[in-house]
Image (cartoon, helix red, strand yellow):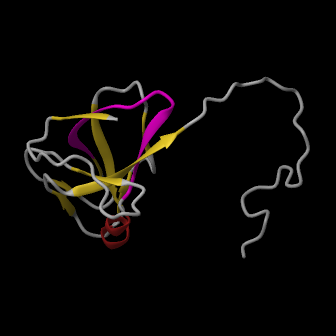
Amino acid sequence: MKIRMISRSGIYPEYETEGSAGMDIRAWIPEPITIEPGKRALIPTGLFMEIQPGYEVQLRARSGLAIRQGICLANGIGTIDSDYRGEVKVALINLGEEAFTVYSGDRIAQMVVCAYTRAQIEPAQELAESGRGSGGFGSTGVE
C-alpha cells in the first residue's frame, strides 16, 4: 500500500506491537484542537493513500482514548475506499465529561487493512428459511 505524507512529523502509520492488527495514525494539525463534551471535530492526518482494489482501510477508535477520555470515532468505524485519494481525516467525538485537546503528533485512531468482496444483488420475492428466522435484537437471549 502506498502512502504519501505531507506531515512534517515523518511518522508513517505503524504497528505498535508484534500482534497488533491496527496501525496507529497521528494528527497533523497546525494548532491544537479542543473537543468539548458532546462535540465533534474532523482531524487531519497529513496522509494520502493508494489502496489496492479489493481492499479498504478501516479507521477505528483507540481503546485507551475511548475508555479513559471518551474519545471515539463519530461514525463508529470509518472506511477509506480504494479509489479515494484525498487526505485521510478522522472524525472524532468526545463522549467524555471533560474537554479533550488533540495536539499534532497525537495518536488519534488506528487503521486496519481489510479485504472485501463486492456482492451481486439478486432481487427476490422470497428468501430461504433459517433456524433463526426474523428474530433479532435480543431474540437469542440476554445471557
Find residue 109 and report its image quarter.
bottom left
The spot of residue 13 in percent (x, y) is 26, 48
Q: Is residue 64 magenta?
A: no
Residue toward you, 98 or 55:
55
Q: Residue at (91%, 44%) from the top-left corner?
A: 129
The spot of residue 10 in percent (x, y) is 12, 45
Number of numbered markers: 0
Q: Residue furthest front?
A: 18
Find residue 101 and report its image quarter.
bottom left
The spot of residue 127 in percent (x, y) is 87, 36
Q: Residue at (32%, 51%) from the top-left corner?
A: 92
Q: Which residues are magenta?
A: 42-61
Find residue 108 and report its image quarter.
bottom left
Is the magenta region chiefly helix, strand or loop? strand
**Rendered-image quadrant of the N terminus:** top left
Query: In the image, is 125 to the left or to the right of 6?
Result: right
The spot of residue 23 in percent (x, y) is 33, 53
- Give the vertical position of 44 relative to 139 (above or below): above
Residue toward you, 129 or 20:
20
Query: In the image, is 132 to the left or to the right of 50?
Result: right
Q: Residue at (19%, 57%) from the top-left corner?
A: 106
- Give the vertical position of 12 relative to 88 (above or below): below
**Rendered-image quadrant of the C terminus:** bottom right
Query: In the image, is 5 to the left or to the right of 75?
Result: left
Q: Residue at (17%, 49%) from the top-left corner?
A: 11
Residue toward you, 142 or 18:
18
Query: In the image, is 83 to the left or to the right of 142?
Result: left
Residue toward you, 101 or 13:
13
